[in-house]
Amino acid sequence: MLAAMRAFLIPVMILTATTAVAAPRHIQQVSPPSQSHQDHDRQQPAQPEASPQHSSRSSRSSGIDTIPKDRAAATYAIYSLITPGSLIRKTSTGSTTRWAIAKQTVSFADMNPRIDPRGALKPPPGDEKAFHQAVQDFERLRYLHFRLERHFRLGHPYTLLDAEQIRQLRAAKTSAYPGSTLRNRYAGYAGITFFSAVYFSDNQQAALVYRNDWCGVFCNQAQWFYFEKKNGHWQQMSGMTVPGI
């Protein structure tokens, strides 16, 4: 299975200017779920038609922090490079005028399909150390959520949607009778993009990030990306696409 997934690896070069920032030091380490929780995860396969699930509580009331300042610039630079995905672009029409992005990042437990970056990617030859450091950052932070802010540089109108708005958008796209109010409210959106946090190497010169584009029942596409910063520009080194079933 691992060999088959790796067959999809597609090196792509994407450039953008950004500013180097210091490695983070103040994020609290979070222990993974208990063994019973992990067993439950293994016993409950992800439903292919569903998008990542989110808490109904607001980011502020649930105590979810924004992206730490010492990694925010690099995080939003990388997000902006891959927003939206090809699936959202392809399903966009003349009537879809805005891109939707989930306001809260997804954790590893939220991912649907749930994919470990080590099963989806392999490091470019010659610099495996930076990749493995980013994986260690993923292991440390993978069960945390962060609240996103309007720091994307897209050159296109976009909206950050909270959990209730995401529920309404999904209903507008999938329900047989969503009602004219919901249908009209979300008519301008082709779907929604979910992001994980960005997981960095020690010197923030390499990074991993997960993106899931959702556009309806049986219409979603998840992907892990690996970036390296070369000559002041982020370059996508590898990535694997997992289409919705």
Image (cartoon, helix red, strand yellow):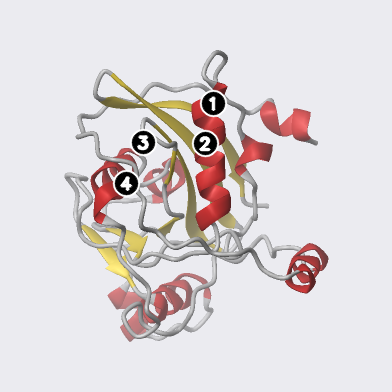
- Disc 4 on helix, strand or loop? helix
Between the C-alphas of marks 2 and 4, the distance is 16 Å
Give how far apart the Cα atoms at labels 3 and 4 are: 10 Å
Q: Earlier in the sequence, mark 3 or mark 4?
A: 4
Marks 3/1: CA–CA distance: 12 Å
Q: Position of residue 174 (x, y in %)?
A: 52, 72
Q: Which mark is residue 129?
A: 1
Q: Tell me which numbered mark, 3 or 1, is placed earlier along the sequence.
A: 1
User: Can residue 85 be seen by looking at this rendering?
Assistant: yes
Tell me the residue that label 3 is attached to. Answer: 204
| Sooner in the amino-acid sequence: mark 1 or mark 4 | 4
- In what quadrant of the picture does the N terminus appear? top right
Please state if 96 lies on the left or on the right of 178 as rendered. left
Q: Which residue is mark 4?
A: 75
Q: Considering the numbered disc 3 on the image, is that residue within a helix, a strand or a loop?
A: loop
- Tell whether label 4 touches label 2 (CB within 8 Å): no
Q: Are marks 3 and 4 in contact (CB under 8 Å)?
A: no
| Helix, strand or loop for disc 1 | helix
The residue identified by callout 2 is: 133
- The percent position of residue 132, horizontal first and vertical second, equals 57, 33
Q: Which label's residue is closer to the chain start, 3 or 2?
A: 2
Callout 1 amino acid: Lys
Q: The residue under label 4 is which amino acid type?
A: Thr
In the rendered image of this protein, does residue 51 appear above or below residue 64? above
